[in-house]
Amino acid sequence: MFAKVTTACVVGMDGQLIEVEVDLSHGLPQVNLVGLPDSAVRESVERVRAAIRNCGYTFPQERITVNLAPADVRKEGTSYDLAIALGMLLASGQLSPAQLADTLVIGELALNGDLRPVPGVLAMVHHAKAHGYEKVLLPAANEREAFLIDKIAVCALTNLKEVRPFTEGNSHWSKSDRLQEQLGAVEAKPASDKTSADSLPEQGIDYADICGQLHAKRALMIAAAGFHNALMIGPPGTGKTMLARRLPTILPVLDDEEAMETTKLYSIAGKLMSRSELMRVRPFRAPHHTVSSAGLIGGGSVPRPGEASLAHNGVLFLDELPEFSRATLEVLRQPLEDRKVTIGRAKAVYTYPASFMLICSMNPCPCGFYGADSAHAACTCSPNRLLQYRSRISGPLLDRIDLHVEVPRVDFQELSASMPSLSSAEMKAHVLAAREVQSRRYAGTGIRCNSELTGRLLRKHCRLEPKAEAMLGQTFEALGLSIRAHDRILKIARTIADLEHEPAIAVRHVAEAVQFRQLDKRDR
């Protein structure tokens, strides 16, 4: 007897359909699992055997061959358990195959037959829907995640015993469009319309909590408006970490396309907090400085997204930047340019998106007080030690950071002042207005923000007034800027002009953009 059931796996960012073929033939009772399975898939045979017996079915006492096709794709994980079990029950005649036509089957089995959730369901169902599948059979814990794909019929099971009513046509199918209607009332709105407190990454945090530092707030508002990278430099305790952690409060929420892509990433990584709705808050990732290269950009024997990809469409915050190993930091060069991460393995090449804002902080020297204006906090570092500290960050990496922001010590008068500080709501209003300008300007080009401008479009949309062009030329020669630094100054100036709703880039816009290149000026 022969049976075939369709399941799926995740390859990189996308799902891939897998056919589970089960053949029963005469011979000694044994199970042969073929099709490049890893150890987790091989172990599924024992889980399936126990689950079938404990749910009142009969495990076939024949020679069983299970093929996972296509056979040249490496099979990993536990999502094949339910499909293998159904294939054996269908091939042995214990279930009817009528209800399984055009049905995707996903799920991990416990020994007592209970169905456990698996990661990556969103990517699998999305891929299956694109290839004509309109029904999916999966664990109840993954049901609402599958509902995020519109117009898909879902049958959620809690135990293998519930499979028999399903194959007899007695199970209840739920249509995902009903949940989509509930979510759509909010999700159909443009991202700029969602400014409620629910969009904040942490309830209660606000830029109004930070006294002073108006220059740093201005820089981060520019970074948020154009999705630029930024590096904050200042003594300990000046609020660099507080400034960075409040950045998501002024960013627009994810639009539908961004939300689907980000939610798929988190589903694949097994880090999805809510399975009932798309992610709308932009991710904020802050890895510790001991993170490895693989942990930062992804990798491993079974490649998974790293912190750079988990920060996709959001913020990657590297606190105490020089404390990260230089080898780890250097792997960020390619993602910062290409906005994606490519991981090569012997069997396949995996590509994950990595379009993130890189926000970093560092002290000006090892002791932290270089350049401090206080007699009580004098720098004790020697010139050699200072040079060694700064050399931990390579020039090419610094060149890819748009804004270099000084965060000085706040004096007592600013701390004790009763005047209100600039709040997240005020900053976000300016950011959303600038993003709206960019959205209209780049409509139909595939570009969302000024930071993505390159080549012809950069020259087209970042034209300078004659005086501004002369000023930038003088700065370029005086500081010996690279072409990349020149282009980033243009993008920052374009964002500053957008914040002021100015169609042309004037001298004052270029001047402000240049003063945010602090490390290009240093030691000259």
Image (cartoon, rainbow, N blue to C red):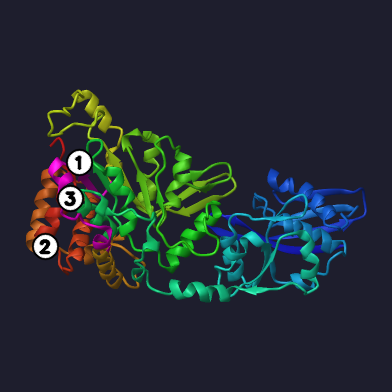
Q: Residue at x 15, y 35 (%)?
A: 523
Label 3 element class: helix
The amino acid beneath tag 2 is Ala
Question: Is the Cβ of the residue at disc 2 closer than 8 Å to that at disc 3?
Answer: no
The amino acid beneath tag 3 is His
Residue 203 spot, x, y in % from top left: 38, 56
Residue 275 spot, x, y in % from top left: 55, 61
Instruction: Give the residue pinned by disc 1.
Output: 519
* Residue 410 included in the magenta stretch of the image: yes
Q: Residues within 10 Å of mark 2 (few under 14, many from 20)?
A: many
* Residue 67 included in the magenta stretch of the image: no
User: Disc 3 vs disc 1: which is toward the camera?
Assistant: 3
Instruction: Give the residue pinned by disc 3.
Output: 215
In this rendered view, identify the residue nearer to me: 14 or 195.
195
Q: Residues within 10 Å of mark 1 (few under 14, many from 20)?
A: some
Residue 58 spot, x, y in % from top left: 88, 56
The stretch in magenta equals 400-428
